[in-house]
Image (cartoon, rainbow, N blue to C red):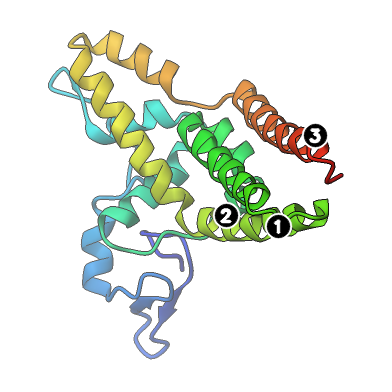
Amino acid sequence: MKCEICGEKTKINHGTGQVICCEICSLDEQNLKSNFLDTPNKKEVQIEENGQLTEKGALKIFIGDEADYYLRQFNNIKNDITPRWHWPASFCTLCWAGYRKMYSYILITVIIFFVFDLSLIALGAPKYIEDVRVVNNILGIILLIIFGINANRLYYMHAKKKVNEIMCQYNDIEKQKEELAKAGGTSNLGVGFALLATLTQGLVILALLNNLGLV
């Protein structure tokens, strides 16, 4: 049997056959049932209610692909349940962010790498290009861990912010749906932007090292 909150296996009392708790969420049977009522697994997410978009409905339109998965993770976050490790965000961090149109996260990350590299150059540390590579590799590993753990939470914050902006800006429900779908969803161009930003940062640092005769 699977947990209705996170989809993972639950523990079973083999004597009574009752659910004891979820191995991931650590919820007892009563809490499991009550939380289940507020999850998108129970029934289809209601998009509209009384002529207005519901919160989950707006989020579902914004998310687009894999909406059910992310709504489950968002629900876990709201219930203070640790979100699952996000493998795509861990292994393809900036590409995942670009795919989900989280461009500000890409720019912030690239700027952090750029500032660290510039600091090394200013301090005269990179007598060899290997010094910069080592630092970038360390930062990269830290970044993978951060995004693997927090990707669902970061995407939740991003989605909530965008949804709230659109819902406040437009009153017409059809216009809201249109703008939510346009602002959210996925983007292959976003992946390209992530790759281009990373490549540009690397080339700029390489050019600086070359001008200083360090490569």
What residue is shown with label 1? Answer: 125
Location of mark 3 (residue): 211
The answer to whether 10 appears left or right of 87 in the picture is left
Q: CA distance from mark 1 to mark 3?
A: 15 Å
Residue designated by label 2: 143
Residue at image x 44%, y 41%?
68
- As drawn, the label of residue 70 is none
| Mark 1 or 2, nearer chain start | 1
Mark earlier in primary sequence (1, 3)? 1
Q: CA distance from mark 2 to mark 3?
A: 29 Å
* Mark closer to the chain start, 2 or 3: 2
Give left or right: position of 201 versus 105: right
Residue 73, position as x, y percentages in the image = 40, 51
Label 3 neighbour load within 10 Å: few <14, some 14-19, many 20+: few
Is 60 rendered above or below residue 113? Answer: above
Residue depicted at 49% across the width and 60% down the height: 149
Q: Is residue 137 left or right of residue 15?
A: right
In this rendering, the count of numbered labels is: 3
Percent of width and height locating residue 76: 33, 56
Asked if labels 2 and 1 touch by Cβ distance under 8 angstroms, the answer is no
Residue at the far bottom in the pictured view: 15
Quarter location, residue 160:
top left
- Element type at mark 3: helix
Foreground of the two, 135 or 58: 135
Amino acid under disc 3: Asn
> Tag 1's secondary structure?
loop
Relative to 144, residue 115 above or below: above
Quadrant for residue 62, please give it: top left
Disc 2 marks which amino acid?
Leu
Labelled pair 1, 3 in contact (Cβ < 8 Å): no
Q: Is residue 143 visible?
A: yes
